Image (spheres, grey):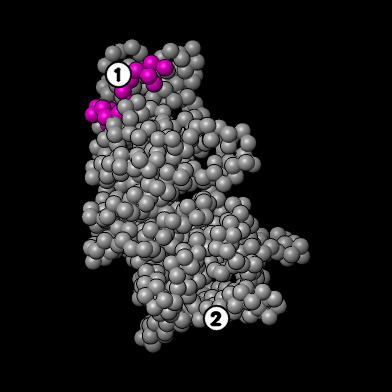
């Protein structure tokens, strides 16, 4: 089959994927429910093994990378699940709340040792461990063997299909799939094809968690690091062509779309510096970005980590892809992120091996149990909460706001911490524990604190609205004495009714964050510093616990905005809040350079939970001839300490056409607030917000 035809066939199905998460849970609880005589670990292990031994093994025509969840329950199974097993499962897992899967597992371990090698490591621990750790180690062995069995079932299915296949080329492909699935992930990978299949299959496996019914969003880490030795060896020995390697990477990317439903985020990072301080820049760095152009889907969410000394060709490659209207790659500042991680006690070695764990949340690879966006905080609403009285000064208002915010941070932290404590008591995830340091070394499940880093990352949404609001309040109430605070609050409560002229003056005449005004921009640093210092006061349960803040929003700027009344910055009730840490929608009056200057006047490094700066450029102006200007803009952002920049290159006309005729633009992808989504999937309010964002020329 022609490579382009193969990709096109698979990507057309992946635009609206059929992802079924009930088959695994049905099989697990069918065994688990009535198996009450054994201890929890044994009961879990037996049910997990039963599920994996009986999971379907779908292989589509032309498929080369296998392992997916596209089969549905039969009518009888669906009835059993809904009437018998699902009610039991929901009751059993009702205390298991909180975040999950915002991480990348230890792919180097899987590729170098194989699952049988990990079992050998566990056997070593069993020979010397205390008696109370043996149930943990034994269930780990059970689930690893179950994954191996699932892979062997795929191999058997591929061989059966090969027997019936008339086409010689496809027959050979199926036999190769069978050979590889018999070998990996049980054993170490020895070729690029084996490595890619092993990476996908273990991610497919770990995405099945019987205690978590929501979609799992595991990231693929740094493929231009762990896959490169296999690629280079095969290329040097003439065992693979660059074209076939690109095909495998493209198919791996499409499988992400068959594993993670649209509206979330899953992908990988490339580039940056490795643990020895060497720049990672190779064929796979470019090829993993080329995937974006080849598959043209919402996933993978790709981040290019740029750093001092990285050749321009990789940033230029990113700009070329973005100029085609893609929403990836996002540009991350490797040096700032590494510095930020080290400021929270991460050794430099781990600080160079991180992932944007879904949108922009930074977590160390292979050793994290980090709860990101836990929770989101509506910053403008917290300001509105304190505006119902008079204040003797602007500083007094700030103090009231910060006191209110402090109480909220403590309350939300206590809530998340208690959820984490309860989950540790009632939950387990032995398969994931085998793939995250230091669970096996400690003999402790990841849900019970076995991971090396146990952070909680709250996200503070709408800070730019607060910044513009603080300036407007200071100007109207305290500097010019045009109105009292209560009068201003009444205007807001009435959504600027009969005060449109005032609203337009606030929007059009007052300086705004994003236009290089030191007074306004200074309020962002004021708020950011308070958040950072307040979070340092709280230490989560389990070792290496930290409360690490962020200022990104996913889709929460639209959800919060929908329920938030008018704000002092001139925003009307119901309109989305700012989409990240850049200026509010449509308020950049002085061009992209001024916007960048504003958004980098405050230190990004402490906000490791994620900083998202969205910028939108006209497609007509974003051409190969303008790449040098675009490179200069990005480099300015990076050199000034910017954390991450997200670029949308599209035109208002295209977006309007997609809004009017969604079926004709089903695969139009846009960047939202840290992640990408199909434009026709997002709400009408979100569509309006994306269209309203300032469109820069270059």
Residue underneath mark 1:
475
Q: Quadrant of the C terminus?
A: top left
- Residue 254 forms part of the magenta stretch: no
Residue 497 drawn at (x, y percent): 50, 15
Of label 2 and label 1, which has the lower sequence position?
A: 2
Q: Is residue 126 visible?
A: no
Residue underneath mark 2:
179
Q: Is residue 349 above or below residue 194?
A: above
The residue that appears at 23% across and 53% down in the rendered structure is 308
Residue 183 drawn at (x, y percent): 51, 81
Q: Quadrant of the N terminus?
A: bottom right
Q: Considering the numbered disc 1 on the image, is that residue within a helix, a strand or a loop?
A: helix
Numbered range of the magenta stretch: 504-521
The residue that appears at 58% across and 56% down in the rendered structure is 8
Depth check: 14 or 557 in front? 14
Q: Is residue 144 above or below residue 632?
A: below
Depth check: 392 or 334 in front? 334
Farthest bottom residue in view: 127
The image quadrant that residue 165 belongs to is bottom right
Total tally of numbered discs in the picture: 2
- Mark 2, residues whose alpha carbon is within 10 Å: few (<14), some, or many (≥20)? some
Depth check: 586 or 178 in front? 178
Residue 223 drawn at (x, y percent): 40, 64
The residue that appears at 48% across and 73% down in the rendered structure is 193
Q: Is residue 421 left or right of residue 310?
A: right
Q: Is residue 300 left or right of residue 128?
A: right
Q: Is residue 24 above or below residue 266?
A: below
């Amino acid at each position: 089959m022609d490579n382009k035809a193969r990709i096109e066939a698979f990507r057309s199905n992946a635009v609206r994927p059929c992802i079924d998460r009930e088959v695994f849970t049905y099989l697990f609880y069918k065994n688990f429910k009535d198996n009450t005589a054994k201890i929890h670990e044994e009961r879990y292990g037996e049910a997990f093994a039963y599920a994996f031994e009986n999971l379907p093994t779908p292989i589509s025509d032309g498929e080369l990378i296998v392992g997916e969840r596209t089969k549905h329950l039969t009518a009888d199974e669906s009835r059993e699940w809904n009437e018998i097993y699902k009610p039991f499962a929901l009751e059993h897992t009702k205390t298991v709340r909180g975040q999950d899967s915002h991480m990348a597992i230890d792919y180097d371990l899987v590729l170098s040792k194989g699952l049988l090698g990990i079992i050998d490591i566990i056997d070593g621990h069993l020979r010397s461990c205390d008696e109370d750790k043996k149930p943990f180690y034994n269930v780990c062995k059970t689930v690893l063997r179950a994954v191996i069995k699932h892979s062997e079932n795929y191999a058997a299915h591929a061989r059966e299909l090969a027997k019936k296949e008339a086409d010689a080329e496809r027959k050979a492909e199926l036999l190769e799939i069978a050979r590889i699935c018999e070998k990996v992930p049980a054993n170490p990978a020895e070729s690029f094809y084996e490595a890619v299949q092993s990476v996908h299959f273990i991610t497919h496996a770990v995405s099945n968690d019987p205690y978590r019914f929501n979609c799992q969003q595991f990231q693929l880490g740094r493929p231009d690091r762990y896959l490169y030795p296999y690629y280079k060896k095969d290329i040097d020995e003439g065992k693979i062509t660059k074209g076939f390697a690109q095909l495998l990477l493209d198919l791996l990317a499409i499988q992400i779309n068959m594993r993670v439903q649209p509206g979330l985020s899953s992908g990988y990072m490339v580039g940056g510096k490795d643990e020895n301080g060497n720049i990672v820049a190779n064929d796979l760095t470019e090829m993993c970005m080329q995937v974006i152009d080849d598959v043209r889907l919402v996933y993978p969410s790709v981040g290019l980590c740029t750093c001092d000394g990285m050749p321009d060709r990789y940033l230029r490659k990113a700009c070329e892809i973005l100029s085609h209207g893609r929403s990836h790659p996002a540009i991350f500042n490797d040096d700032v992120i590494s510095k930020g991680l080290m400021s929270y006690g991460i050794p430099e070695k781990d600080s160079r091996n991180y992932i944007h764990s879904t949108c922009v949340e930074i977590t160390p690879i292979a050793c994290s149990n980090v709860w990101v966006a836990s929770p989101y905080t509506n910053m403008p609403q917290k300001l509105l909460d304190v505006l119902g009285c008079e204040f003797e000064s602007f500083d007094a208002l700030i103090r009231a706001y910060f006191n209110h915010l402090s109480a909220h941070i403590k309350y939300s932290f206590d809530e998340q911490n208690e959820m984490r404590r309860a989950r540790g008591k009632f939950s387990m995830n032995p398969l994931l524990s085998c793939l995250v340091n230091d669970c096996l070394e400690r003999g402790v499940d990841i849900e019970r604190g076995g991971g090396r880093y146990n952070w909680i990352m709250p996200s503070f949404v709408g800070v730019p609205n607060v910044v513009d609001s603080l300036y407007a309040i200071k100007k109207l109430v305290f500097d010019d004495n045009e109105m009292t605070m209560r009068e201003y609050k009444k205007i807001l409560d009435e959504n600027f009714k009969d005060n449109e002229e005032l609203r337009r003056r606030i929007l059009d005449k007052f300086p705004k964050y994003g236009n290089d005004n030191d007074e306004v921009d200074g309020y962002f640093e004021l708020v950011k510093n308070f958040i950072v210092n307040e979070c340092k006061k709280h230490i989560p349960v389990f070792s290496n616990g930290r409360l690490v803040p962020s200022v990104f929003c996913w889709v929460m700027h639209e959800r919060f905005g929908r329920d938030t009344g008018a704000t002092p910055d001139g925003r009307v009730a119901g309109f989305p809040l700012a989409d990240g840490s850049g200026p509010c929608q449509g308020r950049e009056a002085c061009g992209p350079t001024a916007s960048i200057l504003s958004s980098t006047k405050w230190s990004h490094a402490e906000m490791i939970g994620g900083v998202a700066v969205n910028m939108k450029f006209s497609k007509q102006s974003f051409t190969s001839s303008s790449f040098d200007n675009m490179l200069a803009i990005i480099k300015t952002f990076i050199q000034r300490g910017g954390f991450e920049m997200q670029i949308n290159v599209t035109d208002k006309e295209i977006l309007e056409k997609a809004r009017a005729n969604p079926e004709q633009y089903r695969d139009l992808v846009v960047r939202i607030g840290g992640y990408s989504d199909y434009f026709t999937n997002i709400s009408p309010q979100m569509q309006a917000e994306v269209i309203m964002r300032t469109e820069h020329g270059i």
